[in-house]
């Protein structure tokens, strides 16, 4: 894997002080946000795919932004962990197509049906770069903050010793989305 790695820089947040480091893979810059310590037996790790609408614009159509903020708080409290922020917007269909999928959802399609209407699989994401980032840190085992069994199954080199649920309270805008994630996507909600 051809990856360029940036220097580390301090990233003070409202949840705590982290270090940030970028990993450039082809045309995508992924971000590692980590606590000072990573020397515990199995750091608490969130692999989070970019969601501009949820993460930065606080959209209530999904649970992404709330999961990111909850994960940052949990990892800061734990004192040993990381967030791997992967540039895989819209389950890796990109922002343009994600907004088109949103428009289809406004017309009655669920999130998976909308992706199919646009010619995509239900989920186009991959996690090889996440394993690469963890290996670069020397992390051999993690406690993974996820509700998505596909993330767990995708790891071959880093051991997942525990799945830690990351459940967000549904709201009127994302109830259907969360139901589809559970019923059609197999998410553990």
Image (cartoon, rainbow, N blue to C red):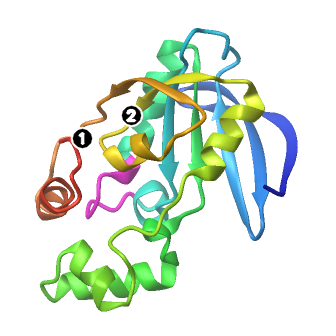
Task: Residue at 30%, 52% (x, y): give it.
Answer: 63
Quadrant where the C terminus sits is top left
Disc 2 element: helix
Please state the horizontal and vertical placement of residue 146, each as a whole percent of the image: 36, 38
Rendered view: 14 above or below 133: above
Asked if 107 appears above or below 125 in the picture, the reply is below
Q: Tell me the SS state at disc 1.
A: loop
Residue 97 - label: none
Name the image quarter holding residue 172: bottom left
Magenta part of the chain: 58-65
In x, y percent, where is residue 154? 47, 47
Looking at marks 2 and 1 on the same chain, the residue that comes earlier in the sequence is marked by 2
Residue 57 lies, with reference to residue 128, above or below; the image says below
Outermost residue on the top side: it is 40
Quick check: is 64 in the magenta stretch? Answer: yes
Q: Residue at x 65, y 36 (%)?
A: 33
Label 1 crowd bin: few (<14), some (14–19), many (20+), radius 10 Å: some
For the residue pair 11 and 67, the one nearer the viewer reads as 67
Q: Residue at x 29, y 59 (%)?
A: 62
**Would residue 62 appear left or right of 75 to someone viewing this image?**
left
Left/right placement of residue 177 relative to residue 80 reads left
**Is 22 part of what is drawn in magenta?**
no
Q: Which residue is mark 2?
A: 70
From the top left corner, tell me how far across and down residue 94 is, in percent.
52, 76
Check if mark 2's residue and mark 1's residue have beta carbons within 8 Å.
yes
- x, y percentage for residue 53? 42, 66
Q: Which residue is mark 1?
A: 168
**Which corner quadrant holds the N terminus?**
bottom right
């Amino acid at each position: 894997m051809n990856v360029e790695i940036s220097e580390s820089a301090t990233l003070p947040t409202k949840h705590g002080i982290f270090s940030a480091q970028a990993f450039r893979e082809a045309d995508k810059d992924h971000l590692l946000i980590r606590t000072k310590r990573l020397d515990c037996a199995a750091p608490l790790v969130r692999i989070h795919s970019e969601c501009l609408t949820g993460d930065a614009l606080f959209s209530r159509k999904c649970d992404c932004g709330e999961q990111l903020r909850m994960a940052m708080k949990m990892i800061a409290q734990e004192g040993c962990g990381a967030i791997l922020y992967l540039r895989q917007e819209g389950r890796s269909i990109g922002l343009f197509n994600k907004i088109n999928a949103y428009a289809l959802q406004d017309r009655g399609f669920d999130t998976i049906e909308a992706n199919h209407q646009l010619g995509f699989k239900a989920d186009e994401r991959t996690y090889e770069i996440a394993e690469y980032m963890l290996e670069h840190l020397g992390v051999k085992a993690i406690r993974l903050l996820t509700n998505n069994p596909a993330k767990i199954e995708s790891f071959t080199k880093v051991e997942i010793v525990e799945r830690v649920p990351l459940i967000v309270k549904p709201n009127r805008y994302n109830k259907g989305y969360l139901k589809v994630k559970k019923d059609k996507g197999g998410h553990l909600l």
